[in-house]
Amino acid sequence: MEPVGDLDSRQQALKPIQTKRSAGREVEGDGEKPEDIEEEEEPLSPAARIFHEPCFNVYVIAIVGCKTRINVDVVKANLGHTLLKHPRFSSLQVKDMKKDGEMKWVRTKVDLDKHVIIPRLHNTIDSPDKTVEDYISNLSKTSIDFSKPLWELHILNLKTSDAESIAVFRIHHSLGDGISLMSLVLACTRQISNPEALPTLPVKKSSNPDPVNSGGIWWTIRLVWNTIVDVLMFVATALFLKDTVTPLSGGQKKGDGLGSRRFVYRTVSLDDIKLIKNGMKTTINDVVMGVSLAGLSRYLNRRYGEAKEDKGATQKKNNLPKNIRLRATLLMNIRPSPGIHALADMMEKESKAKWGNWIGSVLLPFVIALRDDPLDYVRQAKTIIDRKKHSREAIFTFFIIKMVLKLFGIKAAAFLYHRVPNHTTMCFSNIVGPVEEIGFYGHPMVFLAPSVYGQPHGLMIHFQSYINKMTFVLSVKEEIVPDPHQLCNDLEESLKLIKDAVIAKGLVK
């Protein structure tokens, strides 16, 4: 989904840091205060503090595949000139014991040897892909020590089936929203064809048309009505409305986001997705959501029929229960992303750039059913997305959480952030990536696969485009989705079936 447009002209920018030495502060964790720290008197925002609550301790993961082995010395040298120039990546999060444990940003000298991690790997590994998958999964069982800024870069110089080496960013969500953090990672890259140029992202068309040119009063009435309905649904979900118990919800309360997660990804042709988009006159978002609807329907039909003989499934005869309520929570930063160029300037010139978590929620209903016509999945997805575009759900859910935060405090707001995902089944997102080949500090990239862990959902699906490819990334709790590679197969097969149907119906000229 695309971020909501600009809501507030006020610029909460990262200003040049004014530092001073101060005593009486304690670093959360082991309680010891590292040496060589300089104090910044800016407190953590309420949204950043929410991501430290036990029920919502969320990390962003970015898996980068490269065409060559990664030169660790080159990466370290460049990090000092780019990422470390961002105040959040060179600051500790410290409790001020003189102010009831209020957390503040504290500028510190960063020891890159504690952030750039190179695991020891055996020269002969039977299954490199499985080794990388297990390594990243093990990261989800741990957290980052508060005695250092809350980010790490893991470099695995191990050849896999789709890359010569893998780099894995792990960043605590309190440092920023997902879109801004991914933009910051991309701001550290340059075009392979022009090493001085930043990546180019597709220009997005506005999803908020002028009401005067869109039907006037009737357009406004529909907007108000849709927003009221969506906000009431959000409140009902927070209070009592739960999704249907399915194999994807584990048949139990999901609880917190702790525990082992498995991250698997698959890269498909973006040209195939564009062919469907052009043939059906829809958007990329419509297609990837339609593929997700189809893939999840195939997967759930198989899971429900595990104890039955497979006689072939059709729209009328299948293993799926009727009227499954299955929804995805889409967490959106309603403040526009600062953009790659603004972040690059900030790191290079220490200029200002918008930053921070202004997060609202959107609930996406996924209609789970087998369709004889594969194109029906994309049509259904388009209907859902068009309806959500004509609503201000994300804005109002943000202000609801903001009001709860102001009236009842951090723990109540964190409970609300956690409650809605706990009553829904999955998380879903689609992120637009560069249109040309880029290099990570000179290392040509094959793919980029972002994800998260720490949320209560048992399943998260993230789509990331790059050049002429689309990578979909699954983040799953192993006890809920024990066979994530099968779900990847179902998503890939669904894309093929939809593409073949578009061609067979003569929709492509």
Image (cartoon, rainbow, N blue to C red):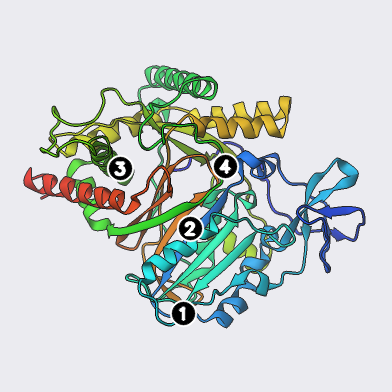
Q: Mark 2: few, some, or many residues within 10 Å (few <14, many ≥20)?
A: many
Q: Mark 1: few, some, or many residues within 10 Å (few <14, many ≥20)?
A: few
Return the disc, 4 or 3, that comes first in the chain's sequence: 3
Front in this rendered view, residue 209 or 244: 244
Return the disc, 1 or 4, that comes first in the chain's sequence: 1
Closer to the camera: disc 1 or disc 2? 1
Front in this rendered view, residue 437 or 216: 437
User: Is residue 56 found left or right of 387 in the rendered image?
Assistant: right
Q: Are marks 1 and 4 in contact (CB under 8 Å)?
A: no
Which residue, given by chain and number where applicable, does mark 4 sit on? 335
Question: Residue flagged by tag 1: what amino acid is it?
Answer: His
Tell me what residue is drawn at x 77 percent, y 61 percent: 107
Tell me what residue is drawn at x 46 percent, y 79 percent: 122
Q: Secondary structure at mark 4?
A: loop
Real-space CA distance between mark 3 and mark 1, rounded to the nearest whole angstrom: 37 Å
Which residue, given by chain and number where applicable, does mark 2 sit on? 137
Question: Residue flagged by tag 2: what amino acid is it?
Answer: Ser
